[in-house]
Image (cartoon, rainbow, N blue to C red):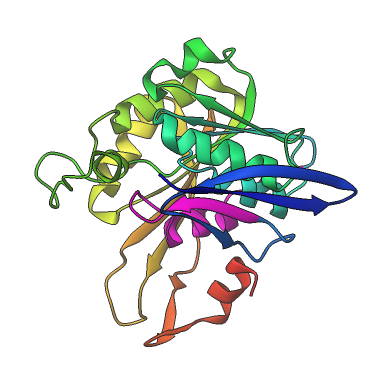
Amino acid sequence: MSEKEITRSRENAETKIIIHENERLDELHRNGYFIIQDKDRFCFGMDAVLLSGFARVKEGETVLDLGTGTGILPILLEAKTKGAHFTGLEIQPESADMALRSVAYNHLEEKISIVTGDIKEASGIFKKSSFDVITTNPPYMIGQHGLVNPDDAKAMARHEIMCTLDDVLRESAGLLKPQGRFYMVHRPFRLAEILSKMISFRIEPKRMQLVYPFVDKEPNMVLIEGMRGGKPRMTVEKPLIVYKEQGVYTDEIYGIYGY
């Protein structure tokens, strides 16, 4: 396997990291940050970026991202918000290693921690009621919904193989502080299930936004905010349209990406 060493100087600090074969450095267009990804594994998509724009993190708050992959959400949220500290939990060691190297490359070791572990065991890894905010971009597909990719890394990212919606909500309910906020991106075809299960785990749905690829198409993503122990009342925000024409994002999407 071929690899190369990259040195980066930033804010009077110098960091050396290793980039392995098939990996690449992708610019995030935020604060000069980059992220390491493997073209043969699951790479982050628009859903993660949209969630980073939907989630609200206040100054001084602590954030946990469940199933962080290569660390895209902690890195973007650190760039976009004034949160005090961000933690990413990832079960796949290879992805967690890429996330750690991305954190080091961007000189964010004091702001972002990456932990290798299972979402189903999160409440044993971290202290209960210890986070102000939890974010997650979980696997969307259950049973035979969609085709299971033979590549295990991609399959785990897309299908409920290693964890289920119940696992995510149960662990989030235990780790959020009272009145702590939960943010998730998911698929509309599971919306009824999502809302009912959030309520059953005492994460009250508070805000929702549907994402449409084009103005005349059905929504293909839903962004949801919940509050641990919140009172029943949910706001439905105006639709978010991705493209105004083929290949051209709407102004809202360009704004979220930071272009």
Image x and y of residue 41, in percent: 34, 49
Image x and y of residue 131, in percent: 63, 26
Start-end of magenta stretch: 34-58
Quadrant in the picture for the N terminus: top left
Image x and y of residue 39, in percent: 38, 56
At horizontal 68% and vertical 46% (from top left) the residue drawn is 105
Figure check: 228 above or below 27: above
At horizontal 61% and vertical 29% (from top left) the residue drawn is 179
Could you say which is closer to the camera, residue 197 or residue 101?
Answer: 101
Q: Is residue 231 visible?
A: no
* Magenta stretch: includes residue 214: no
Quadrant in the picture for the C terminus: bottom right
Figure check: 13 above or below 253: above
At horizontal 31% and vertical 63% (from top left) the residue drawn is 220
Name of the residue lying farthest toward the bottom: 245
Q: Is residue 213 left or right of residue 44?
A: left
Figure check: 45 above or below 183: below
Could you say which is closer to the camera, residue 185 or residue 67?
Answer: 67
Q: Is residue 98 left or right of residue 201?
A: right
